Amino acid sequence: MKLQVPKDRFSLNIDPNWSVLEIGGGHNPHPRANLIVDKYDNDNNGHRAGDIVVRKGQKFLLADGENLPFEDNEFDYVICCHVLEHVDDPVKFIKEMTRVAKRGYLEMPSLMGEYLVPKGSHEWTFLDIDDTIVGKKIKDIGPIGKHIDFGDFFLYYLSRESVAFKLLMATYPDILTVRYEWEDTLPIVMDPEDEYYNSFFEGALTQEQMLKLFPKRSLKEELSTFFAAFFALSRSMFSKILTGSRLRKLDKSIGLNTQKVS
């Protein structure tokens, strides 16, 4: 059952006392995870942007997400971000997630995200259609990222440098990703034969399909979402400015002290 579409992976309904598993934390594990499993060690085969990181207080275990070495409902919550697009069998992977935990969070690139920010290591692309995760093989859809690739521009330039882009992603996160917090069950359909599902992956989106993927908001909801994102982003940027200012003052102070000693 779908609970919500979180604005990001840090806006999850996780009780402080819950035991949390993360599958594929890689170079950027979720700070709330108690145990992180990954199929690969630092020989990541191009699936990660860097080596595995394990934060203080976390444990790490090499394990395959399609065959997790845990008992049923051993965890209260499971997190999986940007892994499903790489796996051999997404249905089996999801069954394992829902077997070992009662609830969790799943995030992966959307179909639109694959066109705008394509990655050669991705096997699958997904949409959330009527609260069901629907996936298709990328190679069966069309020429995504074969000739023109704007991935680095979106991921490593705009996401760092553009305030406007950050605001867009904060107010419409599902442009590039599918974000799905669930409890008890997580419905998934892969390589659908149903024409209804397939129509979302083919040709131009109809107005009805657009509203399915991006439900219309009232003016009040739109303004509320925008200003919440704006103030959150402003606080974050202001905090970074203050931190940078303090560090520069500290560096200057250390430099002055060094001059006195010498």
Image (cartoon, rainbow, N blue to C red):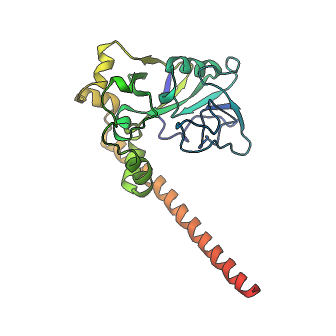
Kindly tell me whether residue 226 is visible in this rendering.
Answer: no
- The residue located at (33%, 36%) in the rendering is 146
Q: Is residue 94 above or below residue 32?
A: above
Where's residue 52, x and y in %? 63, 41
**Camera-nearest residue between 259 and 181:** 259
Where's residue 12, x and y in %? 56, 36
Where's residue 232, x and y in %? 48, 53
Res 209 quadrant in image:
top left
- The residue located at (71%, 18%) in the rendering is 71
* Number of dots carrying numbers: 0
Kindly tell me whether residue 117 is visible in this rendering.
Answer: yes
**Camera-nearest residue between 150 and 112:** 150
Image quarter hosting the C terminus: bottom right
- The residue located at (37%, 15%) in the rendering is 192
Where's residue 220, x and y in %? 34, 44
Q: Is residue 118 left or right of residue 71?
A: left
Furthest toward the top, the residue is 193
**Camera-nearest residue between 83 and 139:** 139
Res 41 quadrant in image:
top right
- The residue located at (32%, 27%) in the rendering is 212
Q: Is residue 24 above or below residue 27?
A: above
Q: Is residue 199 left or right of residue 186?
A: left
